[in-house]
Amino acid sequence: MHDAATHDDSKGQYFWVWGALLALTAIEVVLGYKQVFSPVRMLEVLLVLSIIKSALIIGYFMHLKFERAIMRWMLVISVTACFVIMYFFFFPDAGRIVTLGVK
Amino acid sequence: MADASMPHDAVGHGLPGAYEAPLFGAYSKKVGMWLFLASDSLTFGALLFAFSYNRIYTTWPTPFHVQSIINSTIMTACLLSSSLTMVMAVFAAQRHDRAWTRNWLLATMAFGTAFIVLHGMEWSKLISEGLTIPWFLKLSTAGTATGEMADISKNTPQFPATFFGLTAMHMLHVTIGVIYLGVIAFRKWFLPVLGVLWIVGFALIPSDNVFHWGIHVLLIGLIVASIILFLKPKDYDAQDVEVSGLYWHFVDLVWMFIFPLVYLLSTKIA
């Protein structure tokens, strides 16, 4: 059996992950409220920080890091592929409304 | 059903009691929850894409003052802390410590409830200031409000539409999560608590507040939980706690995108 019960778990690492998530949130708030960057650069920075936070949550709290490689890769690749398809189809298609002048 | 505890060489189909090893090395409930979460992530993905699209192609307001940012930061801390207590609940369940499993699940539910209450207060404040979706203007007293939020509702209706749509969907997920954890932790004993919360909430929340009707989500949760608990009564084990934890962490995960995209990118500097 390879589930959360069998891998070498130490509770300390979860407190570190929790601390890191709170620290990253604090960085986001300071960046957002001080408006350190231009809006587009701010979006990029906040998205990168959010992706790091989500990786920590998925990897540690949701234990995906400790699952079998086939499960890890199947989930990550399939969800990422869906988002890539959404990005390349939704945004250009939604942009047609502006281009065609539809209100 | 393939059992994850079977050794991986147990593939002799002809042998009595032997099953093929599971492909993902995990029990079926966990794989099922992961597949559900993968599909649910696309629901939130579509809503976030819609929000981002409107933000790019519209003159976007920045209505969130320092009070809103502080409030949403505390909400974020509540969710992150609830994920930690959820992990502790899973550990307690794996060592068959029922008392501490319940305690940690209760702590997780408390953080989740705090998130919902804070979010509800934030919503109520914004609505009272006039931020509301267009068709709701005619139905509520918010339609008579004047000021910054009322102007946003009239001039950029995309903002309240996407803001309330996205955050309502997330709030619904958190509420379902709290009920889910309550069922796992307390089973049938949670049903009367849920019923009392629904009645008290309905009685105490003013009738012009959107949550006077929103509280009926608890009634729907009560009915669904009752059906599940009475049709299939069981003692929830460590696997059930872990699967409910997956759902809870997902709710936390989604907020990690909503918080910066919706709040921090719409911050008003004093």
Image: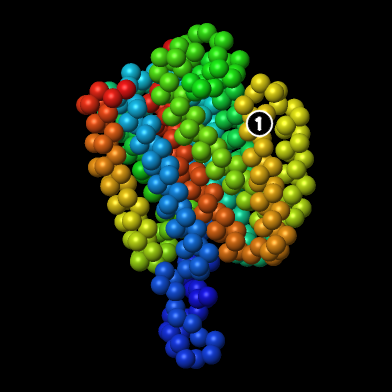
The vertical placement of A83 against B48, above or below, is below
Circle 1 residue: B213
Residue drawn at (51%, 39%), measured in percent from left and top?
B170
Q: Secondary structure at mark 1?
A: helix
| Residue drawn at the location 76% of the way across and 34% of the way down | B200
Task: For residue B232, say whether it is visible.
Answer: yes
Residue B205 position, x and y percent, is 71, 26
* Side of B82 relative to B160 (left or right): right
The kind of residue tagged 1 is Trp
**Closest to the observer: B91 or B154?**
B154
Q: The numbered mark 1 sits on a residue in which chain?
A: B
Q: Residue at x 58, y 51 (%)?
A: B86
> Would you say residue B105 is visible in this rendering?
no
In this view, the residue in front, B196 or A66, is B196
Residue B68 percent coordinates (x, y): 51, 22
Instruction: Please state the total of marks drawn on the protein image.
Output: 1
Q: Position of residue B128 (x, y in %)?
A: 58, 17
The local crowd at label 1, few if under 14, some if 14 to 19, many if 20 or more residues have their Cα within 10 Å, is some
How is the structure coloured here?
A: rainbow
Q: Is residue B25 above or below residue B242?
A: below
Q: Residue at x 62, y 26 (%)?
A: B210
Q: Residue furthest top?
A: B146
Which percent across, then down, holds residue B103? Answer: 69, 51
Question: Horizontal placement of B107 versus B149: left or right?
Answer: right
Q: On screen, B35 above or below B63?
A: below
| Residue farthest toward the bottom in the current orientation of the protein | B15
Quadrant of residue B124 within the rendered picture: top right
Quadrant into which the C terminus of chain A falls: top left
Q: Is residue B31 left or right of residue A41?
A: right
